[in-house]
Every structure is written in C-alpha cells, then in structure tokens.
Amino acid sequence: MGIGVSLVLIAVGAVLAFAVHVTGQGFNVHTIGIILLVVGAIGALISMIFWSSWGGFGRRDETTIVER
C-alpha cells in the first residue's frame, strides 16, 4: 500500500466517521470510518518507514574498487 492509497483511505474514513449521519439498522458507518482511518494511518506509517530504505529522498554512497 502506497502513500496515495493510504491518503485515500484516511479521507474516506474521515468522511464516513465525521460527516455522514445515518439512522437505521445494520452495520455502523461510523465504525467503518474509524477502521478505515486506522488502516490508512498504519499504511502511511509503514510506507514512510520503508520509503527511506527503498529509495525516496536521501543520498546513496557507492564505492567501486578496481583491483589490478
């Protein structure tokens, strides 16, 4: 899951948790929103942790040794 997908999950979760008002029986929309917020936040955190090790910003030092 990348940063973009995580941000979409966070946005959809926030809308479901805070902006949608539903009355009725069945599943709870607010709970689904909170779950999507948490999953999106965890995905963004994991993506940022692995971003530095797979590329991202930063400098790589490569040394080539040629023996004769």
Image: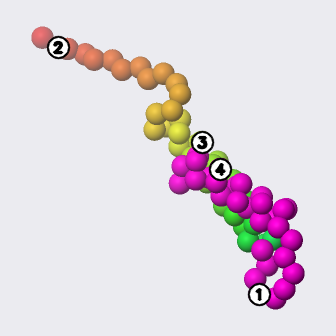
Asked which secondary structure carries label 3, the reply is helix
Residue 34 in view (yes/no)? no
Packing grade of label 2 (10 A; few <14, some 14-19, many >=20) is: few
- Compared to 56, does 43 lie above or below? below
Kindly identify which residue carries mark 2. 67
Pick whichever of labels 2 and 1 is earlier in the sequence.
Answer: 1
- Lateral position of residue 56 relative to residue 43, left or right: left
Residue positioned most to the bottom: 25
Q: CA distance from mark 3 to mark 2?
A: 39 Å
Foreground residue among 26 and 56: 26
Q: Hey, what amino acid is under mark 2?
A: Glu
Q: Residue at x 84, y 62 (%)?
A: 19
Main SS of the magenta segment?
helix
Kindly identify which residue carries mark 3. 48
* Nearest-to-viewer mark from 1 and 3: 1
Residue 30 is situated, as x and y percent measured from the top left of the image, at 81, 71
The stretch drawn in magenta includes residue 58: no
Pick whichever of labels 4 and 1 is earlier in the sequence.
Answer: 4
Kindly identify which residue carries mark 4. 7
The image quadrant of residue 15 is bottom right
* Nearest-to-viewer mark from 3 and 2: 3
Kindly identify which residue carries mark 1. 26
Packing grade of label 4 (10 A; few <14, some 14-19, many >=20) is: some
Q: Which residues are magenta?
A: 1-29
